[in-house]
Image (tube, coloured by chain):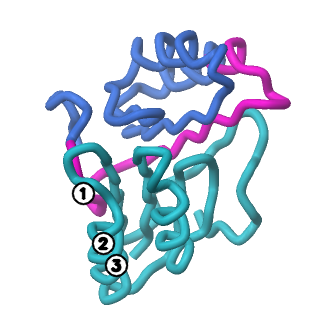
Chain colours: A blue, B cyan
């Protein structure tokens, strides 16, 4: 499946969350990562992120897509992430 | 169509970008908005955002979906946005 991850975590935990997310996904923009991921790795990713955040303070959103056939990504302004992106 | 907007703009311009985006979409999390939008309003939104940002410094990503049938949103941690969300 395809995943878009957007995090909003306390500055103290950003590096840890980013490091975990980058094991599975590509960095696209400040606080946004995306990529193809297997069901098994998606479960791992969520488990690892859960351990890294403070659930009373932080928020991480996962948008998952069974297909990217009906989707499109457009950027206005500078493109920050790499070209490894799939969408 | 359904849109997810993620912005990464200089602090000086956040309020203006957020105000524009909220005319069309719901706030979900720090720097993320989403919602159903018509094609005509999507063009308007992009035009207005273009005028508010500095294209050499800021970055705004629009993910658009012709259908949300194949998608899902999961949140770990606190839910910051309202319940108006569609996905």
**Residue drawn at point x = 71 percent, y = 20 percent:** A53
Position of A76 with respect to A3 (left or right) is left
Indicate the quadrant containing the C terminus of chain B: top left, top right, bottom left or bottom right: bottom right
Residue underneath mark 2:
B46
The chain holding disc 1 is A
Position of A61 with respect to B46 (left or right) is right
Q: Give the residue at the far right of this rendering.
A: A56
Q: Position of residue B8 (x, y in %)?
A: 41, 44
Q: Quadrant of residue A7?
A: top right
Q: Position of residue A32 (x, y in %)?
A: 43, 36
Secondary structure state at the residue bearing disc 3: helix
> How many residues crowd around disc 3 within 10 Å: few (fewer than 14), some, or many (20 or more)?
some
Residue underneath mark 3:
B42
Residue underneath mark 1:
A76
> How many residues crowd around disc 2 within 10 Å: few (fewer than 14), some, or many (20 or more)?
some
The chain holding disc 3 is B
Q: Nearer the viewer, mark 1 or mark 3?
A: 1
**Residue drawn at point x = 76 percent, y = 66 percent:** B83
> The magenta stretch spans which residues?
A49-78
Indicate the quadrant containing the N terminus of chain B: top left, top right, bottom left or bottom right: bottom left
Q: Position of residue A58 (x, y in %)?
A: 72, 31
Both on one chain, marks 1 and 2?
no
Secondary structure state at the residue bearing disc 1: strand
Q: Quadrant of residue A50?
A: top right
The chain holding disc 2 is B
């Amino acid at each position: 499946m395809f995943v878009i991850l957007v995090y909003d975590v306390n500055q103290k935990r950003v590096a840890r969350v980013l490091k975990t997310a980058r094991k599975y996904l590509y960095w696209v923009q400040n606080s946004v990562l995306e990529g193809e991921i297997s069901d098994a790795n998606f479960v791992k990713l969520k488990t690892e992120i859960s351990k890294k955040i403070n659930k009373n303070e932080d928020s991480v959103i996962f948008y998952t897509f069974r297909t990217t056939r009906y989707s499109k990504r457009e950027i206005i302004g500078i493109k920050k992430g790499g070209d490894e992106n799939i969408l």
